[in-house]
Image: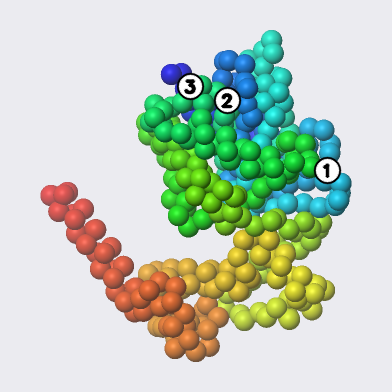
Amino acid sequence: MNCCHCTARQTGNTFLFLFPGAGITFYNVGSGTIPLETPRPLTSLPSRGPVLEILHCQSGMAVWHGDGETGKREEAQPDAACILSPGAFSLRLLDAADTTKDNVGADRGIQTDSGFQAGGGFQGFRLLADLGALADNPPALLADTPVFNRFLPAVSEILAKRGAEKPLSLAPVIFQEPEESDHIFSGFYGHEEPFYTACCRLKALELFLFLSRFFARTGTPDCGHREAGAYPPEQIRLVRQIHDELIHNLDRRITIEDLSRQYLMNPTTLKAMFKSVYGTSLAAHVKEHRMERAAELLLETGDSMAQIARAVGYESQSKFTTAFKEFYQMLPTEYRRQHKRDAAGTRAGRNGHGR
């Protein structure tokens, strides 16, 4: 099996051929269109598709405005945008004819506009799976399972029904990453050769298996599914400004009412937009950042509990302690003691091996 691992230098993207019928592109896009491209075909045989697209957002944001190749947008809301935020992924069907037309007479692979724009930076991956090619020649590890000849085609049928009134290659279906699949998506990132290719292939198979099992169990695309809110791009930028203000001022208690007055936005609309963009409520999102910052301060400083509580926006040390225990399942004093003990043990082990 030949492996193509090449970089699209003009966009800073990296493509990896996984196995016949599947390839993955890792994106690092500062701004502008997120291209749907592979520098080689997914399969050397005529595709009988369709092609399943899985786009995952690791950080930043992807804003979907419509079919970039045809210039189409959803007729109901021509200025609307669907949002792929960190920890979210989308599923979409691409017509096999669209993905193979560039292959005629040239080994060009897929090179079209995805309809996604990077919203202030985007890092993530796009996994393309030619379901027909995979059914004809499944990877060995899943060859004896019904993943490629029954379950993934069923997933494509479900997605097709959701978009029955729209052409394929239009609206993606956006999901918030289920907790049970977090290790799968995170496992695509951070590998180096000689393990990079093997890890990506294994994770791709694991992701196919997860999607197949979930859809077989539920029969609906509902694994944390959320209909992406449709908002004008300027409102999306506003929500990102609000997010940045909150995260850079964790020591302050900024209320919804404060933000509503400052940004001239109805509180209900603000909360709905924030959840659509970031996948969780504003309060839960900020609390998560407060707790993560508190954990950093516990390990990196000698500050007292009262000082750390104030640094992350709690005037009451007891309320901070309660919130921290709810989040980490241990008191902040226990967290500091345990992690420092673990770190000391690791250092001692290294020194012992060095003798």
**Colour logic:** rainbow
Picture coordinates of residue 317, whole percent (x, y): 45, 87
Does 291 appear above or below 232? below
- Seen at 19% across and 59% down, the residue is 348
Give the residue displayed 84% in from the left and 39% down from the top. Answer: 72
**Tag 1 near tag 3, CB within 8 Å:** no
- Local secondary structure at mark 3: loop
**Residue type highlighted by circle 1:** Arg
Q: How many marks?
A: 3
Whether residue 171 is situated above or below residue 279 in the rendered picture: above
Q: What is the number of the mark on residue 132?
A: 2
Q: Which residue is mark 3?
A: 137
- Mark toward the start of the polypeptide (3 vs 2): 2
* Residue type pointed to by label 3: Asn
As measured in the structure, the alpha-carbon distance from the residue carrying label 1 to the one carrying label 2 is 28 Å
Amino acid carrying mark 2 in the image: Gly
Residue 78 location in percent, x, y? Answer: 86, 49
| Distance CA(mark 1)–CA(mark 3) | 36 Å
Which residue was labeled with disc 1? Answer: 73
The answer to whether residue 95 is seen in the rendering is: yes
Please name which of the two marks, 1 or 3, marks the residue nearer to the observer.
Answer: 3
Along the horizontal axis of the image, is 242 left or right of 314? Answer: right
